[in-house]
Amino acid sequence: MFDHPIIEVTLGLVFFYVVLSLVASAVQEWIASVCAMRSKNLRSGVENLIGNDYAAKVYKHPLIKNLAKKNGLPSYIAPETLSSVLLEVIAREDSGKSYVAHTSGEAKAMVEKITDDHPLKAILSAMIDHGDDAANALKDRLAGWFDEGMNRVSGWYRRRAKLFIFVIAATVTVATNASSVHMAEELWRNDALRTQIAAQAQAVGQEGDVSKLEVSNLESLGSFPIGWGEREGGWLDWLKRVFGWLITIAAVSLGAPFWFDLLGKVANLRGVGGQAQSERST
């Protein structure tokens, strides 16, 4: 039962989505690196949290500036570091004295001196207490608040990355004429192709970790029946082709980890079936 062609077609399609998803992810990571998307997203998030004026001063501080390459922006800042640097900037601006030397009373006075129209005053005023350890408590609470804020900033980046993946998936799909409908048809009627791709998919599915796969080593992409070498056909052929593109784009947008996990399950299903049939034949 498990050696039925439907299982092998499914295995081939899932493997096809794994490969294209890896290609799309690699392109997205390359664009993100070239355009410094992560660091710019972080800078935008910090500005949203503390304001453009204090963000500019924080990013000029050596503890932040040295986290990135020359003339670049850091792609990650620990909440504790961001909290310490911001309070140090405010303290130096207020009295020229380092925040680590501030007493609880001085920390409260420092917060009070921030202009009323700046949103940071309301934020810090809500965090500071009247205890003897108010200065340290403020730094810890501010770090916790930054941690929550960074989670939101990461969510912004993930949503933006999903949009980029969708656009890249659409570009790669149309550029390679990667129609899921055509792929399924070819795998169904071409026994040799179906067996070949199913065997490749089975081997890849046994890797156990999608991070071990590299796009540069996936020569199997050339095994798939894709490309623009075919005749264009009539409008019905184009309608079917576009429908196949839409399926591929939607599938690739789900990401390689999703399809790799499913690939392993289908590969195990086929493997169990093949093993059972082998035992029956002996």
Image (cartoon, helix red, strand yellow):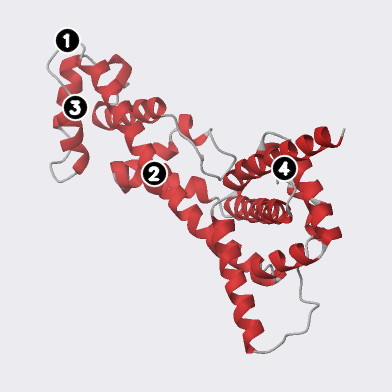
Work out whether mark 1 precedes mark 3 in sequence or the reverse, and give the earlier one.
Answer: 3
Q: Nearer the viewer, residue 19 or 278?
A: 278
Three-letter amino acid code of the residue under disc 4:
Arg
Residue 239 in sight in this render: yes
Residue drawn at point x = 86 percent, y = 59 percent: 192
Q: Which residue is mark 2?
A: 153
Work out whether mark 2 precedes mark 1 in sequence or the reverse, and give the earlier one.
Answer: 1
Coordinates of residue 272 in the picture (x, y in percent):
72, 36
Residue drawn at point x = 29 percent, y = 26 percent: 96
Q: Nearer the viewer, mark 1 or mark 3?
A: 3
Tell me whether the residue at label 1 lies in contact with that at label 4, contact meaning CB atoms closer than 8 angstroms. no
Q: Which residue is mark 4?
A: 270
Q: Secondary structure at mark 3?
A: helix
Three-letter amino acid code of the residue under disc 3:
Met
Q: Which mark is residue 132?
A: 1
Instruction: Indicate the quadrant containing the C terminus: top left, top right, bottom left or bottom right.
Output: top right
Q: Secondary structure at mark 2?
A: helix
